[in-house]
Image: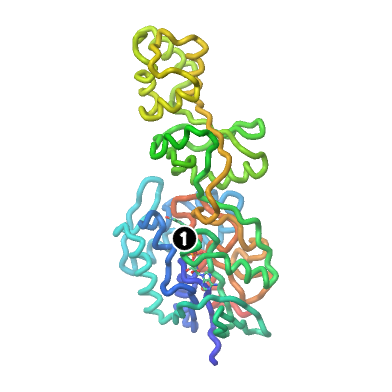
């Protein structure tokens, strides 16, 4: 049985890029995938449109991985967003840039990205073995022995583990690689969800299902501290809140909840108006439009279908006229417009998260090569590595960049 130069486990974006990079350098590469095709998760990214990178600068990229950022300085320099865009363009796929620097294929179809990867894998004659689910990985002298769940044995001098995280398990990413890395002595950091919708305690929230609030101000109160969140769009669901800002900040919010329990989220419907200006406006309006009902007045501040459920929580009659509202009630309404509180008490299950935060400890991976510091010749790429980035194309770029560097180092270095 011949020994492969490199065996790459997992044909997601990280594994495909690692295999392409190894094969481009003339190595005999085998790509092992448990599904019967490559890139199953890739196909559902960006709502099927695949936001594969972002035009942001290197410094912004590092910020998007918060405390994990500096680990990626080298990989994002060696294979940057521009390298990735060039890679797709050189292989016949154009791209478009949208708000926030997000980059999508010009076809707006994730399948186009998967097709390009398939073509390039074929061009460089990467051998792909489908329906191969790695179960055991052992190193004997200089050679790795790979054994599948069906006891199929493969041998290789170098191995790249790119089996992804543990979310959306039906795509094939169920955490096998984490168990395999652990069996080889690696530490796995605590697994937490990133990009996950949050659940809310208040019973009136399901009545708001489907309502999107645009460009609202948001802040949290937890452990006696007020924590401002970025402004943006918020979506109410039948269980709580979602939408760009929530998905982006969910990892941090989950960490806060783990420490302090439930957190209050405050929604500011008029983030450009100061408290004083709002009060002056209310006083003037309550005099000028004194015969108007509360429900008709508040629709200028809140979406109309939100007014009823919200007023109910304050035990205020929506048909009450403005001239019947007491001063205390008016102040209560002003507070509601600038800081409507809802209680975040949890999140959807891990499997519904867009990204896994946690994985193989970065302390045990060389940031310049992606090689294990514990097992020479073993490399990691993609979501299997501890930490996660924000939404906006940063996670796919992480997968492609770490895949590139792992494939490159596995081709170049002797172990
Ligand atoms: C709904 C959704 C939308 C997303 N949208 C975006 C987006 O628009 N932009 C963005 O940047 N990120 C997005 N992400 C995140 C992005 O999908 C991941 O960051 C990326 O797929 C990680 O790539 P990977 O190659 O590390 O892992 P994966 O894509 O998970 O690939 C891992 C591969 O390994 C295979 N595998 C697992 N175990 C074994 C085994 N034992 N043997 C053999 N093969 C195995 C799996 O079948 C899979 O094919 C999204 C995620 C989700 C869930």
Q: Is residue 173 left or right of residue 377?
A: left
What is the residue that sits farthest to the left in this orientation? 107
> Which image quadrant: the C terminus?
bottom right
* Snapshot colouring: rainbow
Residue at the image position 40 percent from the left and 19 percent from the top: 318
Q: Secondary structure at mark 1?
A: loop
Q: Foreground: 104 or 24?
A: 104
What is the residue that sits farthest to the bottom in this orientation? 1
- Number of labels in the image equals 1
> Which image quadrant: the N terminus?
bottom right
Name above or below for residue 68 compared with residue 246: below
Q: Position of residue 291 (x, y in %)?
A: 34, 9
Residue at the image position 50 percent from the left and 62 percent from the top: 169
Residue at the image position 47 percent from the left and 82 percent from the top: 26
Q: Position of residue 64 (x, y in %)?
A: 52, 49
Q: Foreground: 252 or 119?
A: 252
Q: Which of the 4 image quadrants contains residue 308?
A: top left
Q: Position of residue 290 (x, y in %)?
A: 36, 8
Q: Position of residue 8 (x, y in %)?
A: 52, 75
Residue at the image position 59 percent from the left and 82 percent from the top: 157
Name above or below for residue 311 compared with residue 29: above
Q: Residues within 10 Å of mark 1 (few under 14, many from 20)?
A: many
Question: Does label 1 point to a residue whose CB lies under 8 Å from ligand 1?
Answer: no
- The residue that disc 1 covers is 80
Q: Foreground: 321 or 5?
A: 321
Q: Is residue 33 visible?
A: yes
Q: Which of the 4 image quadrants contains residue 365?
A: bottom right
Q: Is residue 369 visible?
A: no
Q: Is residue 381 left or right of residue 93?
A: right
């Amino acid at each position: 049985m011949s020994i492969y130069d490199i065996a790459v486990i997992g044909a997601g974006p990280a594994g495909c890029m690692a295999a392409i990079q190894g094969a481009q350098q003339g190595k005999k590469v085998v790509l092992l995938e448990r599904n019967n095709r490559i890139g199953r998760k890739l196909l559902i990214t960006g709502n099927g449109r695949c936001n594969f990178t972002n035009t942001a600068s290197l410094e912004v990229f590092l910020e998007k991985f918060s405390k994990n950022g500096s680990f990626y300085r080298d990989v994002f320099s060696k294979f940057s967003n521009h390298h990735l865009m060039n890679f797709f363009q050189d292989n016949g796929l154009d791209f478009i840039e949208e708000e926030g620097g997000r980059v999508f294929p010009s076809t707006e179809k994730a399948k186009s990205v998967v097709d390009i990867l398939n073509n390039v894998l074929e061009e460089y004659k990467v051998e792909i073995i489908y329906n191969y689910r790695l179960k055991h990985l052992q190193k004997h002298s200089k050679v790795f022995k790979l054994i599948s769940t069906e006891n199929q044995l493969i041998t290789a001098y170098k191995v790249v583990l790119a089996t992804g995280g543990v979310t959306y398990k039906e795509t094939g990413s169920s955490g096998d690689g984490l168990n395999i890395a652990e069996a080889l002595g690696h530490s796995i950091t605590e697994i937490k969800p990133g990009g996950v919708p949050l659940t809310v305690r208040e019973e009136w929230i399901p009545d708001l299902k489907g309502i999107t609030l645009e460009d609202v101000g948001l802040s949290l109160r937890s452990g006696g501290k007020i924590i401002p969140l970025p402004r943006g769009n918020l979506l109410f669901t039948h269980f709580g809140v979602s939408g760009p800002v929530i998905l982006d900040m969910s990892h941090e919010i989950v960490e806060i909840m783990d420490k302090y329990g439930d957190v209050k989220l405050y929604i500011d419907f008029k983030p450009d108006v100061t408290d004083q200006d709002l009060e002056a406006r209310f006083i003037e309006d309550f005099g000028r439009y004194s015969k108007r009902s509360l429900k008709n007045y508040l629709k200028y501040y809140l979406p109309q279908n939100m007014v009823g459920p919200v007023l109910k929580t304050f035990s205020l009659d929506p048909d009450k006229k403005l001239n019947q509202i007491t001063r205390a009630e008016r102040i209560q309404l002003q507070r509601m417009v600038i800081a409507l509180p809802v209680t975040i008490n949890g999140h959807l299950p891990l499997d519904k998260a867009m990204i896994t935060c946690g994985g193989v400890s970065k302390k045990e991976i060389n940031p310049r090569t992606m090689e294990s510091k514990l097992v020479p010749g073993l490399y990691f790429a993609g979501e299997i590595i501890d930490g996660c980035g924000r939404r906006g194309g940063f996670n796919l770029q992480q997968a492609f960049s770490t895949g590139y560097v792992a494939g490159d180092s596995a081709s170049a270095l002797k172990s």
